[in-house]
Amino acid sequence: MGKTAAQASGAVAPHWADIYADRIIREKGPLPKEQGGKKREEYTCASGITPSGTVHIGNFREIISVELVVRALREKGQPVRFIYSWDDYDVFRKVPRNIPNAAEFETYLRWPITLIPDPYGREENYARGNEADLEKLLPVVGVEPDYIYQAGRYRKSAYAAGIRKALENRDVIRRILNQHRTHPLDDSWWPISVFSTFTNKDTTTVLSWDGAWGITYRCEQTGNEETLDLRTTGAVKLLWRIDWPMRWAEEGVDFEPAGKDHHSEGGSFDTARHICNEVYGVAAPVSFQYDFISIKGKGGKISSSTGEVVSLQDVLEIYQPEVVRYLFAGTKPNSEFAISFDLDVLKIYEDYDKCERIYFGAEEVGEKRRAKEARTYELSQVSSVPGELPVQIPLRHLCNFLQINSGDVAAALDAQDGSESWSEEQRRRLERRARCAWNWVTTYAPEDFRFTLKDGSEEPVECSEAGRAAITALREELAARYEQYDEKGLAEAIYRIAGEAGIEPKDFFVLMYQVLIGKTKGPRLAGFIRTVGRDRVLKILESY
């Protein structure tokens, strides 16, 4: 595969995704290779989550981080498998507040989430509903992993050998875990949990293991005892800290990041690394820790269990897919940042557009900056990089046109200079941006940013004689010489007209905003008048 444009520049400041791709190749060795008795023809990069609630944008950080490294590996000509594990055989521990009839779901606490009905009636179970919501969105942002459903794997006894190996090394695992525990695990501890076949709950006690495939347990709710064969049962599951390294070995995982809570000393990644090596005989994957994401105006870590989350769907309502990718590609994983829904949205779009202009050479910067921005832009694209600089309409400007046209996307775009020459792809991209802009204006924009353009049928605004004289003079000026003015010239004319009428310019601005949009402030007046157009402005000013 050829070099990317950023790499071809010769002044590359390596992107973090490229750095980790190189590290994977260096530490895991060139392909093909032998690992765990299997011939490896590709690198495996992994991510995963428990679908215990809405998959939030914080979870998405891991997914997109892996995808960026996968993309970097593929651009280096390396074969890669990108797997995403749904840990849908985990226990249902807490009822999220955002599901309907939440009280009814208390019955299912301690069940595996794959056996719980979907409260919305859309999918076969609760876990699948949360999975499907994300799976339909990930291709929109260029993420298409191979999905592994852990409930299906466990219930088919696919991990019987891995579970038995953990049982055989029970003392080794306990020693590893106890190195980081205040209260050590005693001899009665087992590395497994059992879902009772009588109640579906994991409120059980392991009584014994026969040294081969047999596990005997007691259901604490019913008092029943039962012996299960690991080769045929789906009721036995490894505890999380053992399940993770077992699957690293099973899938041959070469790379998987984790949140900083997992990467703390003695955390789940630390213990999993030792278990992977000492019990399953393979090296742990290359990894890095990523930081948490907050929502602008809200502090703390996002959590699915509360039900109060911001999902990828919520973010895509406001940010076009390339800008979503840009947020993550342009931020180092170990840096905390906030997803903004306030006025920062305008700045984020401006930053993306600037990055795009730099990539296509439409804006000059230093060579090192250009290389950095170019690589970020490449990784921000959902698929391939456009062949030429896309038509750019600043989001602020687009918001004004949409409000002038009451949210009519087609009308707002048709009003742009040169719109008749856009290609279908250019228009499609701009329509997507316009929909995001309208969603932001109507849902999140500050009140003083919003407006509705009058149509001239309203009662005139009460004003002084000087104010009315200034309005009349401006109306006559626009009727006679509108085409002669650019924005700067029109602004100068407005100041002149105010002075000649004996009214302070700032007071004239307030008056004109009241006349045009019924507010005391708004977009820059001269530019706004040109955006609205002479005919519509004159119609509003007719009654003055």
Image: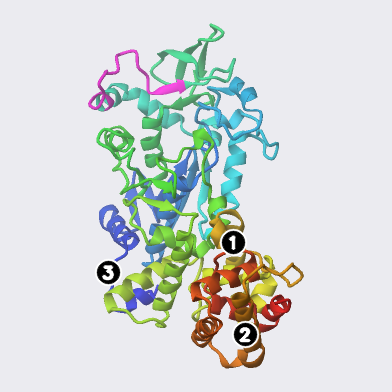
In terms of sequence position, does the residue under pointer 1 or pointer 3 come before the other? Answer: 3
Residue 238 is labelled as none
Residue 13 is labelled as 3
Instruction: Please state which amino acid type lies under the numbered disc 1.
Output: Arg
| Left-right relation of 243 to 177 | right
For label 3, count other residues whose C-alpha is less than 10 Å away and answer few (under 14), some (14-19) or many (20+): some
> What residue is pinned by disc 1?
450
Instruction: Please state which amino acid type lies under the numbered disc 2.
Output: Ala
Task: Give the image location of residue 5, x and y in percent.
Answer: 38, 77
In terms of sequence position, does the residue under pointer 1 or pointer 2 come before the other? Answer: 1
| Left-right relation of 273 to 77 | left
In terms of sequence position, does the residue under pointer 2 or pointer 3 come before the other? Answer: 3
SS for callout 1: loop
The boundaries of the magenta stretch are 177-193
> What residue is pinned by disc 2?
473
Q: Nearer the viewer, residue 399 or 34?
A: 399
Query: Quarter of the image holding residue 246?
Result: top left
Q: Nearer the viewer, residue 236 or 121?
A: 121
- Against 412, residue 348 (above or below) is above
